[in-house]
Amino acid sequence: MEAEKQNIALHIESLSIGYKSKKGNSIVAKNIDFNVFGGKLTAIIGVNGIGKSTLLRTLGKVQPKLSGSIEINGDPLESYKPLELASEISIVLTEPIASKNMTVLELVALGRSPYTNWLGTLSIEDKFKIESALKQMELDALQNKKCHELSDGQLQRVMIARALAQDTSIILLDEPTTHLDLYHKVRILKLLKSVAHETNKTIVFTTHEIEMAIQICDKMLLLDGSQNPFGEPCELIEQKAFEKLFPSDTVSFDSKTGSFRIKK
């Protein structure tokens, strides 16, 4: 039991997320409780506007929590200094990259910024981490290409490779499969799962691809504005959590197939 406790990468308790202003707090979601263990691929799902991206940004300390606690590898999130946090958490948001004129190799190498000196000189270890990230995301053949020459799917793999090169125990990804076709969605999610399982990294991502997440993820958090159930996909199916996700007169969930059906 003690060993399992030590393997908790993310411990979230009674968390409320949203935005602070002079007029007071604007709560987007509350009552969020879950633990994520090392080596697991976890999806955050829910309807539009429920707070998926807000939660991810809060976990990455991009924006402050409103209340509750977030622990990273056993320590409070707020106890981490910026450079310390950069060695524990890497985050890939939906904002476009600053310059697509960089090569794939140059962009992935930016992941080593927390570890390089002020000149940005890459050590042998830095170069090894970069090469490893390129291989894991199957980008070896593209490393000298300019980012503006890449397809959306290729660019998304580059962004993930940059996070991998940062070599953190936790990786947070906001909608990593947006704008991709079915093949590339599946390819990226399978790559993420293999990275989590083979390197013991904790990977958490937001997605609208619920059926895909059910098939491939180890754990899922369903933000629903009230209970926010968390567990293995099969557990959530047994709890009928997905059946409450959308209005029943529009979309229904088939627990036998793990898929949604449009009400005609």
Image (tube, rainbow, N blue to C red):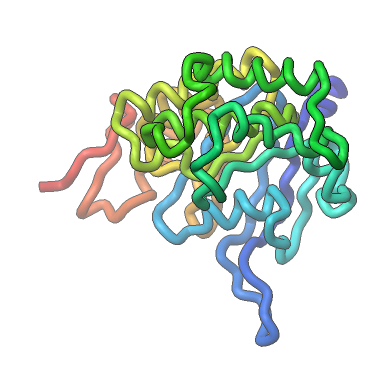
Q: Quadrant of residue 252?
A: top left
User: Looking at the picture, does residue 166 appear above or below residue 216?
Assistant: below
**Near-viewer residue (240 or 65):** 65
Q: Quadrant of the N terminus?
A: top right
Count of marks placed on residues? 0
In the rendered structure, the answer to whether residue 31 lies left or right of residue 226 reads right
Q: Position of residue 246 (x, y in %)?
A: 32, 52
- Name the spot of residue 89 as percent of width and height, x first: 73, 39
Rendering coords of residue 229 (x, y %): 54, 44
Q: Nearer the viewer, residue 169 or 253?
A: 169
Q: Nearer the viewer, residue 56 or 149?
A: 149
View extreme (left): residue: 264
Relative depth, front residue between 226 and 164:
164
Check the image and report above or below for 108 versus 123. Answer: below
The structure residue drawn at horizontal position 76% and vertical position 49%, both measured from the top left corner, is 70
Q: Residue at x 48, y 54 (%)?
A: 224
Residue in the image at 77% along x and 31% along y: 8
Q: Percent position (x, y) of residue 150?
A: 40, 32
Please determine whether, in this image, residue 23 is positioned above or below residue 11: below
